[in-house]
Image (spheres, rainbow, N blue to C red):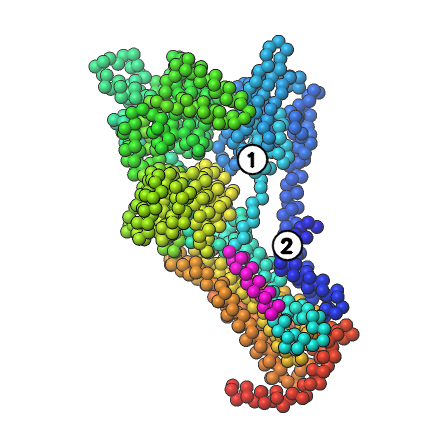
Amino acid sequence: MVIFLGKFKFFLNLYFLFVALSQFIPALKIGYLVTYIGPLVFILSVTISKEAYDDLQRKKRDNEENSQKYEILTEDGFRYIPSSKIKVGHLVRIHENQRVPADLLLLRTSNVNGECFIRTDQLDGETDWKLRTAVSTTQHLEFDSQLCDYQASIYAEEPHKDIYKFIGTFTSFSSDSDNVSTPLNVENTIWANTVLASGSAIGLVIYTGRDTRSVMNTSFPKTKVGKIDWEINRLAKILCVVTLSLTFALIAISNFRGIWYITWLRFLIILSSIIPISLRVNLDLGKTYYSYDIMHDKNIPETIVRTSTIPEELGRVEYILSDKTGTLTKNEMELKQIHLGTLSYTTEAMEEIRSNLLMIYENQNELNMRFKRSKDMANRIRDIVLALAICHNVTPIISEDGKLTYEASSPDEIAIVKWTEDVGMTLIYRDTKKIKLRTPIDTILEFTILEIFPFTSETKRMGIIVRDDITNEITFYMKGADSVLSKMVLFNDWLEEECGNMGRKGLRTLVIARKKLSYDVYEEFQQKYDQAKLSVIDRNGEMERVQNTLENDLELLGLTGVEDKLQDNVKPTLELLRNSGIKIWMLTGDKVETASCIAVSSKLVSRNSSIIQFCKIHDIIELKEMLVGLSSMTEACLVIDGETLQLCLTSCRDLFYETTKNLPAVVCCRCSPTQKAEVTKLIKSKIKNCVCAIGDGGNDVSMIQSADVGVGIVGKEGKQASLAADFSINQFQFLAPLLLWHGRNSYKRSAALSQFIIHRGLIIAVIQTVFSALFYFAPIALYQGLLLVGYSTVFTSGPVFSLVLDKDITFATAMKYPELYKELLKGRSLSFKTFFQWMLTSVYQGGIIMTGSILLFEDQFQNIKSITFTALILNELLMVAFEVKTWHRTMILAEVVTLLFYISSMFYLKTDFEYHNTGPVEEDPEYDTIVKANNMTADIDDEILIIHKVILIII
């Protein structure tokens, strides 16, 4: 019922509902009730059936999930209950590869260390396994059954959407000791809809149903409405005005005869076909076909359409905003260079690193002062290799065949750990407390993890504090972006220059640093940090402030450069898109030098373009002067860093856009996810056409969702971008056919389909108007019953809808001549100009059909309905045939079958084609007007004869 009522929030549906209801009023009744009820019921049935099917499928999936059995721990042992019965406070046991039914606090695992891995791809789209840790006090219990008698209280924050944050406190009560409070964070939780990847675990339910992170993040996004839909909506308003004006003109010309407002309402009902009720459902069905066509195109395999309401927008893209890593590049990382300040090692010199590392471990106690220089360099190599092997979130996994593989949230991390393995330092074990490394001489180094500071896109750095189990030395390692760590390290005079050199080679840089901590310094820090962890108010802020006390005077160990290879066919794809008139911007979190290098190597910047850099500008006056100077350089590529971009977005948005709108390319570096979204919204607000955003990572989601058209690439970092996007593709090169071919077809077809449907309603209204005008402006319907219902359905819908199969050029032509796409950006396929051209065509054709039928068949007035209706149907079939650019067998079949069906209907619906069958005489208040009009025919024979002769003379 709710779905049914919801359909009447749309103006067209509400309008035709009132038209249908008017037929229950005797004074307004025109012909048969089915004439007006039938189309409305059909349209609503199609849309409601689709939504009802989706709801049934959703309910079926919900029932399947709710009926799954799970083990809960009670005082009587484990017992099974359906997931729908699980409540907060239940102790639930999860087995390997089992879906988690609710948000759980992890209390015990089958692993002695209290660890387990979970898969979160159904929650956040990331494909890597996540490590989770049980609460230490409950993990140390001897038996699972002891949990039922365990005395403790748990504080959990209010439910919220952030799946990466959780604040809680676990307080254990004991009769013989003080209460022990343990801080809880996201590492101690398992969210609903994740899957346990290893072992078994017992968790306490803390959130269920709508309070779970999964449900809170399953927000139904606001349905995107394409620009073509808004354009058609404006045209519908014009048609509404035309209907009101025309009906008012008809009663005005008749001098408001009789009960004029009744006559006016009857005219509104008769001419209601001007506003096409079937337009929306035809367009929706067309969009469904376009989506099917896209997903089954062999040129772009495995493409997924997640938003089927906007395929036409693919043909109106004026700007493409693209991420770099994983979008233009493959996100397949390989460490290519390492710089130690005085020496730099490339791939070719990695053997030297390996030999130095081997030397220092083999001769650790034998190197004498004669080899001091070699010893110093070997020690520096060992220090940075050790730092890289320790400071990460990588977990080694040994498969059944004994092969060592790595799991991590970032390909950069895996690339670096693989490199340390190649040079002789292998990560063989990692849990929340220990790291074990195998040296080049097969000795094992063990480190105790004291604290970890995970990487975030906001901090752009990661840190770890470890203690060497042999020497008991405590070391704080940190790695991160040069823009952040350059302010924290000592003796960084060479850092900026070398970062720039690596960036110009297209390498992603990471600064590696360390700080040795005395036991007292560490204890003081840890005490403050533990207190911050227990803080209920602003816990994260308190922890960050304590962490900042360590992040100063770090020893700079070196700089790494990781290469990310370009995606296949990126260069020709960007060239195609640029030649099609689309402006392309790169928005990346990488440094200026790296982004500039990729922009040049990918041909984002053409050969004739110069590169202008706006970096580290903090003065608004200086920035405005530089923007004004740039406005005259139409062939330049602007490269702007995050600080300067933020100044543009906050202080001179309009000037920034006006300056950059004519540039062929813009590269925004060091962009945060928020800045990416802000740039997208800025451009979107300034142009009439569409903005397309494309990316592959979680940091691209806000940009993708802010754009008119969001395209996600299934990447190494997971499916977050793909799941949030309107269209999902596997490679950047698929973007060209998606826009130039499918975008063109979708837009052209919808434009033709909508205008034909409008024409179909207008022409029959014109015929009706001429008919009424010729006969005393009587509000009598010429076509009623099955004829009127069949006109917009079985007699014309097939050929008209078959226009969704039409294509004006071939795929090869669209790819060979991308310049053809520029025509679509002008919006000429559906505009006010084309609309009024179709209106004039409808008036001309409708007038000719009605007046021509009367003049040429004056002696067959009783057959005027069949004559004009046949002419009308043939006219529509011919119009479709003339409009087709490329014939498809389905289109031919639709034309032939429709024609044959119409001819056969003339025999089966013989009475409907007779003029006297305009409806029950006793129910038609204007029937006497028709009788009078028939009698009048003899009086105007002379005039018709004169007009007939004039037409014959002109012919």
Residue 236 counted in the magenta span = yes
Identify which residue, 674 or 207, lies in the foreground.
674
Residue tagged 1:
161
Say which amino acid is labelled 1: Lys
> x%, y% of residue 832?
50, 65
**Residue 326 in picture, x, y percent from top left:** 41, 40
Instruction: State the extent of the magenta-drawn residues as a range.
Output: 227-245
Image height of 235 relative to 293, above or below: below
Compared with 522, 783 (above or below) is: below
Q: Residue at x 66, y 80 (%)?
A: 775
Label 2 environment density (alpha carbons within 10 Å; few <14, some 14–19, many ≥20): few
Q: Position of residue 827 (x, y in %)?
A: 46, 61
Residue 681 located left or right of residue 154:
left
- Residue 106 position by quadrant: top right
Displayed quadrant of residue 155: top right
Distance Cα–Cα, label 1 vs label 2: 31 Å
Residue 254 placement: quadrant: bottom right
Residue 355: where, in percent of width, then height? 28, 22
First along the sequence among labels 1 and 2: 2
Kind of residue sitting beneath label 2: Lys
Q: Which residue is mark 2?
A: 9
**Can the viewer see residue 354?**
no
Query: Which secondary structure lies at badge 1?
Result: loop
Q: Residue at x 50, y 30 (%)?
A: 129
Task: Indicate yes or no whether the magenta region holds residue 391.
Answer: no
What secondary structure characterizes most of the magenta part?
Answer: helix
The residue sitting at the left extreme is 370
